[in-house]
Every structure is written in C-alpha cells, then in structure tokens.
Amino acid sequence: MKKIRRIALFILISSIILTPTQSMAFTVPAEIKQKADELQLDAEAAILINADTGDILYEKNINQKEYPASITKLMTMLLAFENCDMDETITFSKEAVFSIEPGSSHIGIDQGEEITVDQAMYAIMLQSANEVSNGVAEHIDGSLEAFAQHMTQRAKELGALNTNFVNANGLHDENHYTTAYDMAL
C-alpha cells in the first residue's frame, strides 16, 4: 500500500510539474500547504516547484548536498541534445568502456564499437548505460574530465550553483554532488 501511495504521489507531482497552467499567478491553497507539511518522505531531500511561476510548493532540505547518482545522466543528455545531431556517430574508447565500476549499469559496448547519438540517448535513458554516458562525454568534449567541467558550467548557467560534476554517469565520487533545488532547476 505504501508503494502504491508513493507511485500515486510521483504521478501527481509529475502531472503538476508537466501540466501547463493558464495563469502565471499561482497561490498554493492552504489545504495543499497543510498536506505538504504533513508529508513524510523517506528521501533526505525533496522539492516540488511550480514550473510556470517558480513557486516552491514543497521543500525538504533543498540546499543539502546529495550524491546525484544516475540523475547525472540528465545533464549528460541535455549536453548531447544541445551539442550533437542525433545521427552523429560515437566511437567508444578504451577509457569510456573500461573506466566504469564493475557491476555497474552498461549495455556491453566494446572498445572501437560505434553507435549514433540517437542510439546512445536510448541506451542512457532505458539502460542507464554508464559506458555510453562516457562515450557521449568524450564525443562532445574530447575527455571525461573536460565534459565534467562542461556539465558543471552548464549547471551554473541554469542557476544550479551548488552542483559539481566529476563524471558523465553519476558513479559515486564525494566531489560529485548537487542539491534538490539545483536538480529541480
């Protein structure tokens, strides 16, 4: 039952975020504020923002540094969409393929193998493919390190001032962090 409530809450939050509103003025009704205050999430940090107005509808530790894990791949994909044509070919280097942690998500790409950026986006979205994220990084900026700097710079341009990326895939590193507020942006 608890899992069903979480799924329903996720759907509700997603629909609120993704549904355009006609009015730019938005006030959170008192009963919604009360229910939000009563909400008990297992997450260490969370935020719900009205996409049209920027109003924060719910918050919990929104500026606390957290490890973003595979949410990192959203920035990897954003940079791919901004910097590549979907029919470009990515050729995978030894570093892209073999620098991921053993046992982490991958699709079994091998050194020298080629796929299109479009295929890479599906591999990242559907399989959380860490080696493919690395390949995209190298394709765009020539190295994993340069791409991580590019990611951090782009995050800052979006207003995410408490975010630092050190890789394209979200594998753990204590210097790889963000906040709920920054990710909501």
Image: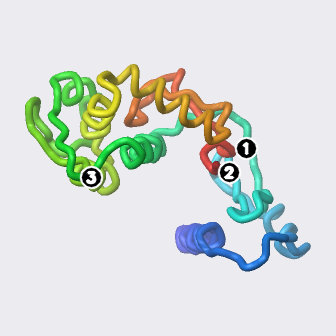
Q: Which mark is residue 46?
A: 2
- The percent coordinates of residue 63 (x first, y second) are 73, 38
Mark 3 or mark 1, which is nearer to you? 3
- The percent coordinates of residue 139 (x first, y second) are 27, 33
Tell me the SS state at disc 1.
loop
Q: Is there any visible trace of residue 2 in the rendered image?
A: no
Q: Are marks 1 and 2 in contact (CB under 8 Å)?
A: yes
Q: Earlier in the sequence, mark 1 or mark 2?
A: 2
Mark 2 or mark 3, which is nearer to you? 3
Q: Is there any visible trace of residue 79 in the rendered image?
A: yes
Q: Residues within 10 Å of mark 2 (few under 14, many from 20)?
A: some
Q: Earlier in the sequence, mark 3 or mark 1?
A: 1
**Kind of residue at badge 1:** Ile
Tell me the SS state at disc 3.
loop
- The percent coordinates of residue 47 (x first, y second) are 70, 53
Residue at numbered disc 1: 62
The colour scheme used to paint the residues is: rainbow
Identity of the residue drawn at 78% across and 57% down: 56
**Kind of residue at badge 3:** Met
Q: Which mark is residue 168?
A: none
Residue at numbered disc 3: 86
Q: Marks 2/3: CA distance?
A: 33 Å
Quarter where residue 134 is shown = top left
Residue 77 in the image: above or below residue 140: below
